[in-house]
Image (tube, rainbow, N blue to C red):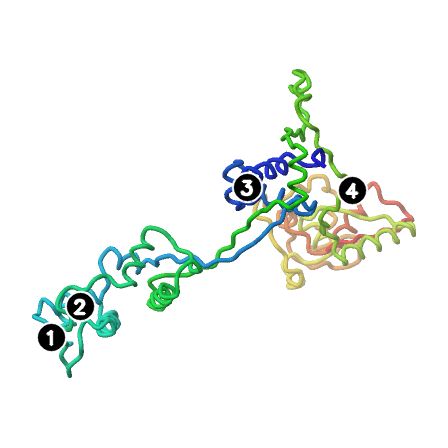
Amino acid sequence: MSSELRENEQRILLCLKRLGGSGKVEQISEIENLAHAAVMRAALTLSEKGLIKIRESRFSVIELTDEGRTYVEEGLPERKLLATVMKAGGKITIEELADKAGLDPRLFPIALGWLIRKGWVKLDGKELRLIVSSEPEEGRDERLLRLLYRRSLVYEELDDELKATVNELKRRRLVRVSEEYVRSLELTDRGWKLLKQGLKVSRELTRLKPELIVTGKWREYRFVKYNVKAPVPTVWGGKKHPYLRFLDEMRKKLVAMGFKEMKGPTVESNFFNFDALFTPQDHPAREIFDIYMVKEPEYGDLSNYKTILENVKETHENGWITGSKGWRYKFSIKDSSRLILRGHGTALSVRMLISDELEVPGKYFSIVR
């Protein structure tokens, strides 16, 4: 069994033995200089093998709020009111007290309520009369606040009186109570049996480096076995969009029928996108495509299409040899070379018709926008 244990698992078992059979995860983590997560991973494996038990307990931690910390340093507001009453000779009106005490107006009625509730003064009409003859001793609330100023406390470890005091301070928002969890590890009979048989921590090797081979130090380590059949999380990778899969199917079917796919640039010139298709250069017919102009570079090179460009120019201006009168305007070669984002797929048909790769007869298609 011991040969099947990983290094951290062996260390935790031996640590629990030194601690008398049980210990908190944080304690073991500090002793063995292991991360909390590393201790828990090893503990879960040891628990599955029946060598330890993992126990979890919940407790409530009491801590001071910022306001509570201020009152420990400066005194409770009812103490300030009491000092003002005593300074006034033991008798003062509520209005005078509010004026002389210098408390926040929102805090004054709360402090006044506690001053009366603690029995330090009594209300006689609109006057407050001192009951105590001297400065009262610290109450449970003040002693508890002072204690919490030094360290946090566990609610479950307090007696009933202190618990009631905590609840009062919580209502006054001077303390906060939060829940925390503690995990402890405890050796089982099976774990003790294994330790009695003798257990020695063996250093593990998960990656064999050249220097370990050269120096022969690899003999000092135990090689970790990897379970290549261990289940791994399912990875849901990205998938192709259904519409794109549909286009791929269409492409395959058309190619199988003898068609050839036409491809071309996304950045196109006005010449192939409009002019070669006999669309006037300055006409509302171009607006239906919502064309985007390329900012840089603005113009393309049509020097390889001089003859065709001239024929298209003549066709626009006077009909050339087509028998048409054309559009009868001055055709701009510069505007024809203006670069745009291709507005439709028919521009590819124009490029194919003037291409040396054109086959007649031939069947062509394009799946573009």
The residue carrying mark 2 is 81
Does the residue at mark 2 contact the one at mark 1 (Cβ under 8 Å)? no
Q: In 3D space, how far apart are the residues under numbered discs 2 and 4 (Cα atoms)? A: 74 Å
Q: In 3D space, how far apart are the residues under numbered discs 2 and 1 (Cα atoms)? A: 11 Å
Kindly give the residue lying farthest to the left in the view shown. Answer: 89
Q: Residues within 10 Å of mark 4 (few under 14, many from 20)?
A: few
Residue 30 percent across, percent down from the top left: 50, 39
Q: Amino acid at mark 4?
A: Lys
Q: Amino acid at mark 1?
A: Ile
Q: Residues within 10 Å of mark 1 (few under 14, many from 20)?
A: many
Does the residue at mark 3 contact the one at mark 1 (Cβ under 8 Å)? no
The residue carrying mark 3 is 20
Q: Earlier in the sequence, mark 3 or mark 1?
A: 3
Q: Residues within 10 Å of mark 3 (few under 14, many from 20)?
A: few
The residue carrying mark 4 is 229
Q: Nearer the viewer, mark 3 or mark 4?
A: 3
Q: Amino acid at mark 3?
A: Gly
Q: In 3D space, how far apart are the residues under numbered discs 1 and 4 (Cα atoms)? A: 84 Å
Q: Earlier in the sequence, mark 2 or mark 1?
A: 2
Using the image as rendered, state which of residue 180 and residue 160 is in the foreground: 160
